[in-house]
Image (tube, rainbow, N blue to C red):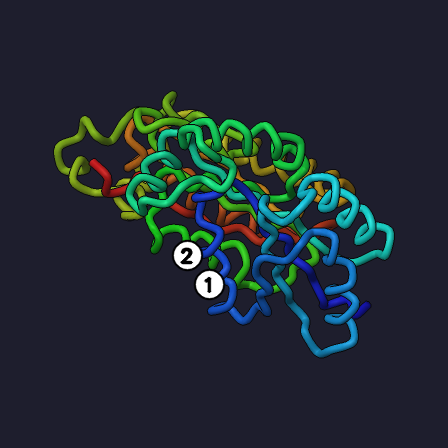
Amino acid sequence: MKNNREVLVLTGMSGAGRSTVAHALEDLGWYVVDNVPAALLPALVEQANASDISSMAVVVDVRSGRFFDDLTTSLKNLALSSTTHRLLFLDATDQALVQRFESTRRPHPLQGTDRIVDGIERERTKLEELRSSADIVIDTTNLNVHQLEKRVGEIFAAGHKVGVRVNVLSFGYKYGIPVDADLVVDCRFIPNPHWIPELRPLNGTSSQVSQKVLTSEGVEDFVKTYVSLIEQIVPGYIREGKKFVTLAVGCTGGKHRSVAVAEEIAKRLNLISDPTPVDAQAVHRDMGRE
């Protein structure tokens, strides 16, 4: 298999946005195969190996036969064949999934004659172990179609990286901690620019706010220490096959402190090249939400 070829297996909860992600991947140049029985995944990969397809995404649905057993076996076979692959799992809260099914007036695939929530519960139980083994988990609860497409672009548009891709995600604690965060940083120890009248209407991307936040007592050492920590654990992520990390940086509202710190952390992470390069990008979940 060519070194620049990769297989992405896309699955997750029904209603969590698989179709949206599949379309976004197609727009990014990935070859997408939808609704593939899990047992046929190895044969499909062999066909891709014989072609000039460098990036293939395979969408696997829980309705495709003996879903879990077949997919688990297929993923093990890919690993044994040294196929570069990742498992992307899409998730959302039960409430969000119920609202989506009700808005489309479609039944849940595992609902049968019961309620939508019963189908969701069955599917979540069925996929629990698979979710825990996923390389990337995207929680789509608070994402609209355009935001989800943007998130997919942030993760997959840059092509295949040798190192680790870090999504530095700023957020506001009052809106909840991101469910898909691997690491969480709390910036609420920093004096809040919200209480400075001339800075309140601005956000952490402005030079005035950024300077105020980053020059506050203890922040330089805090950022430097945390970037050093990430640098130390990145080689371990590579050894464990984890190529995408979400670092959530939070303050109260997700507008000033977390945004400024996330931008600075991402900037410094991008300077890491030895022993393992890091590709970091700052994304701001709650900026402008107030």
On-image quarter of the N terminus: bottom right
Whether 115 is drawn above or below 169: the answer is above
Would residue 116 be seen by someone viewing this image from the given angle? yes
Local packing at callout 1 (Cα closer than 10 Å; few below 14, some 14-19, many 20+) is few
Q: Position of residue 11 (x, y in %)?
A: 58, 47
The residue lying furthest to the bottom in this view is 52
The residue lying furthest to the left in this view is 197
Q: In the rendered structure, which amino acid carries the disc numbered 2?
A: Glu
Q: Secondary structure at mark 2?
A: helix
What residue lies at 81% left-to-right and 50% top-to-bottom? 79
Give residue 149's mark: 2
Q: Secondary structure at mark 1?
A: helix
Give residue 55's mark: none
Q: Which of the 4 quarters of the picture holds residue 126?
A: top right
State the residue in front, 207 or 173: 173
Would residue 264 be seen by someone viewing this image from the given angle? no
Q: Nearer the viewer, mark 2 or mark 1?
A: 1
The residue lying furthest to the front in this view is 113
Q: Position of residue 223 (x, y in %)?
A: 50, 34
Local packing at callout 2 (Cα closer than 10 Å; few below 14, some 14-19, many 20+) is some
According to the image, label 1 marks what residue?
A: 23
What residue lies at 14% left-to-right and 37% top-to-bottom? 198
How far apart are the alpha carbons under marks 2 and 1? 8 Å
Q: Earlier in the sequence, mark 2 or mark 1?
A: 1
What residue lies at 73% left-to-right and 78% top-to-bottom? 51
On-image quarter of the C terminus: top left
Q: Position of residue 203 (x, y in %)?
A: 25, 42
State the residue in front, 241 or 196: 241
Q: Are circles 2 and 1 on residues that touch, CB within 8 Å?
A: yes
Left or right, residue 90 beside residue 214: right
